[in-house]
Image (cartoon, rainbow, N blue to C red):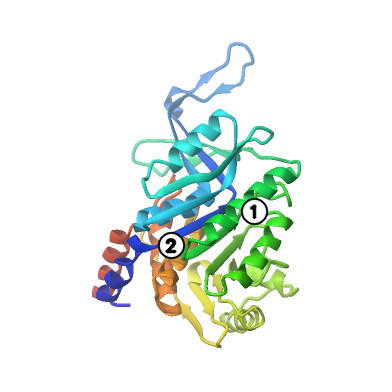
Amino acid sequence: MTPERLRDVVSLYHGLRIAVVGDFCLDRYLEIDPDRAETSIETGLPVYNVVNVRAQPGGAGTVLNNLVALGVGRIEVVGFRGADGEGYELQRGLEASPSVSTEHLLTAHDRRTFTYCKPLLVRPGQVPVELNRLDTKNWSPTPKLLEQRLIESLRAVAARCHAVIVLEQVDAAETGVVTRGLLEAIDSLTDEHPRLLFLADSRRGLKDWPAVGLKMNAAELAAMLDRPKVDSLEAVKEAAAELARGSARPVFVTMAERGIVAAAPEGEVVHVPSVPVRGPIDVVGAGDSVTANLAAALAAGASLREAVELAALASSIVVHQVGTTGVATAEDLAELLERASRS
């Protein structure tokens, strides 16, 4: 991709309307100063003194953050939060951008806000060190009434969007936004809106999902095909092509330092290598930046290869943002592309 073509593609983002459907969570960072360590008088245990607290939307919110950074004109949120302080923080973080609509972020009094609490040891001039994470999740099934309201919200936004991103972040089936009922609704919507781009990602794997665009890693690809592993680049290309033909939708496979493979239903298969590492890295959020860039680029009319090239650039930018769940702006993409074209 040339810098000129990149500018052409991203110039169309302000006219896009993209929905993000799934598990929105709060990423809360507790910055600990190890030089202020104490010992508790009451318990005799070490005390970590938190000197700064920051929070931002995570999970599906990380995809949304990347869409905001790219300048997408309107972003529709479909998900739920708890009626708790974390939910308030999450909604405030989502609404920080005027391009985001939280009309369909439902408040559920019988659910907790999904929260990742990340303690970080912060020393001047050093890379932050993350300690054991403290997670808050829901362990019971999503209530049927809430599920039905989410389906109604999905149907409402799908009718006016250029693309729909679906992200499942929970570990326990049926406890988040992406329930079996919601997947059945997506299956119906793909028939009702055959030209609407759906792009899905799930940390539990995408087996038995409807025929939508699929984004996964190599291990998840192997699991979908009931194979012990899919290791080589050629094997990944063949497997991705097989899936794309079967679903009549594109398939994207991230391979860490080996780049990204994409396959189209018509038979096109592309591989874009990763950008060389330029310093310390933190892979948190890299996959979500890939998802956001693929959806935005394809919705703007980019080719399969162009979309993957932009996603690879974004991933490289995000992994170099250490100690936070990063994003890549359109300006970041242009700068890295210019740098790569000169080298």
- Residue 336 image position (x, y, % from top left): 30, 65
Q: Is residue 188 above or below residue 21?
A: below
Instruction: Name the residue type under label 2.
Output: Ser
Mark closest to the chain's N terminus, 2 or 1: 1
Could you tell me which secondary element the residue under label 2 belongs to? helix
Query: Quick check: marks 2 and 1 in contact, CB under 8 Å?
Result: no
**Residue at label 2?**
315
Question: Can you see residue 320?
Answer: no
Q: Is residue 44 above or below residue 60?
A: above
* Left or right of residue 307: residue 331: left
Question: Can you see residue 140?
Answer: yes
Instruction: Name the residue type under label 1.
Output: Ile
Q: Nearer the viewer, mark 2 or mark 1?
A: 1
Query: Of residues 58 and 91, which is closer to you in this image?
Result: 91
**Residue at label 1?**
151
- Residue 30 image position (x, y, % from top left): 48, 32
- Residue 190 found in image quarter: bottom right
- Which residue is found at the position 51% from the left and 86% from the top? 268
- Which residue is found at the position 28% from the left and 77% from the top? 2
- Which residue is found at the position 64% from the left and 57% from the top? 203
- Residue 126 found in image quarter: top left
Q: Is residue 35 above or below residue 156?
A: above
Query: Of residues 186 and 179, which is closer to you in this image?
Result: 186
Question: Mark 2 packing: few (<14 Cα in 10 Å), some, or many (20+)?
Answer: many
Quadrant where the C terminus is found in the figure: bottom left
Could you tell me which secondary element the residue under label 1 belongs to? helix
Query: Of residues 78 and 226, which is closer to you in this image?
Result: 78
Query: Of residues 109 and 85, which is closer to you in this image?
Result: 109
